[in-house]
Amino acid sequence: MSVTTEKTVLITGTSSGIGLAAAVAAAQAGWLTVATMRDPRKADALLAAAAEAGVADLVRVRQLDVTDPASVAACLDAVIAEHGRLDAVVNNAGAGLVGTVEQLDLADIRAAMEVNYFGVVAVTKAAMPHLRASGGRVITVTSVGGVVGQPFNEAYCAAKFAVEGFMESLAPVAATVGVAVSVVEPGAVASEFVASQDIDLPALLAAHGPYAPALESYIDRALKSFGNAQTSAEAAVPIIGLLTADNPAFRVQTSGWASEFTGTKLADLDGSAVVGMTAGWIA
């Protein structure tokens, strides 16, 4: 085992978007950054960004499929064998799923839960012994959709709600062994996450039958909101803040809009404000 004196962070889902930006920013902050992705052949954009930022020597690309227990175990074992320590994990890998439950295949709903929830649980579980040893931290990118349920995102929001509940429950327990737990809630982010969903809009609308008018209204609103989205680099700033803070908060949003949006839910004791707001999106 080789041991590094540099703090080591493992970040999932770094081939694009927030994960890529966070990996580069973490390296810029002096962290030895293990940047993981399901397919390392997609690492060119990350490596180019790291080289441009002058931190290529602090970025290590590793294969990790968060839905494959063997892949998770192999990756964590390799990190410890190579670096001798793990000081933080950033759970960022995720996948969207647009559609409503009656029209979606149950297999697709289960797959969304696997990557967005069980993948987070698997990586966190594998990392905890090493984070206990280092007094480290777990940072998980959830979403405003982990606080406010949104039309035609039942599966995605359910998974993000589950992650928020998991982490909120874990936080006080992990703290007893010296591990800090935080969640980061982005709103709309102009990244390849949206494009990666590869939505065939006419086919999606046709498949949704009686729900098509409401779905069309939702998609129209969503596309407009992404026109005013944060950049991935902006959304990554709070992640680095949580990595370096002496006393990291449990929950942070990535923008003023995200704070206002999630605040609607957190102050809505009977649920009427949230349901009334989202109903207006598809009227």
Image (tube, helix red, strand yellow):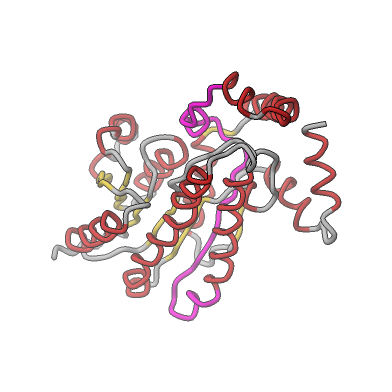
Toward which corner of the image does residue 256 lie, by quadrant?
Answer: top right
> Is residue 184 positioned above or below 248 on the image?
above
In the picture, which quadrant includes the C terminus?
top right
- Image coords of residue 152 (percent x, y): 66, 38
Left or right: residue 103 versus residue 243 is: right
> Is residue 94 positioned above or below 204 on the image?
below
Extreme residue in the left direction? 1
Question: From which residue to which does the magenta span run?
Answer: 172-200
- Image coords of residue 228 (percent x, y): 65, 27
Toward which corner of the image does residue 276 lie, by quadrant?
Answer: top right
- Residue at the image point whose x is 32% and y is 43% from the top: 37
Looking at this view, is 205 or 134 the one in front?
A: 205
> Is residue 146 positioned above or below 152 on the image?
below
- Residue at the image point whose x is 40% and y is 39% from the top: 20
Taking the magenta stretch, the answer to whether it contains residue 100 is no
- Residue at the image point whose x is 53% and y is 67% from the top: 247
- Image coords of residue 187 (percent x, y): 62, 41
Extreme residue in the bottom direction? 176
Looking at this view, is 158 or 33 the one in front?
A: 158
Looking at this view, is 153 or 40 the one in front?
A: 153
- Residue at the image point whose x is 57% and y is 21% from the top: 203
- Image coords of residue 118 (percent x, y): 45, 57
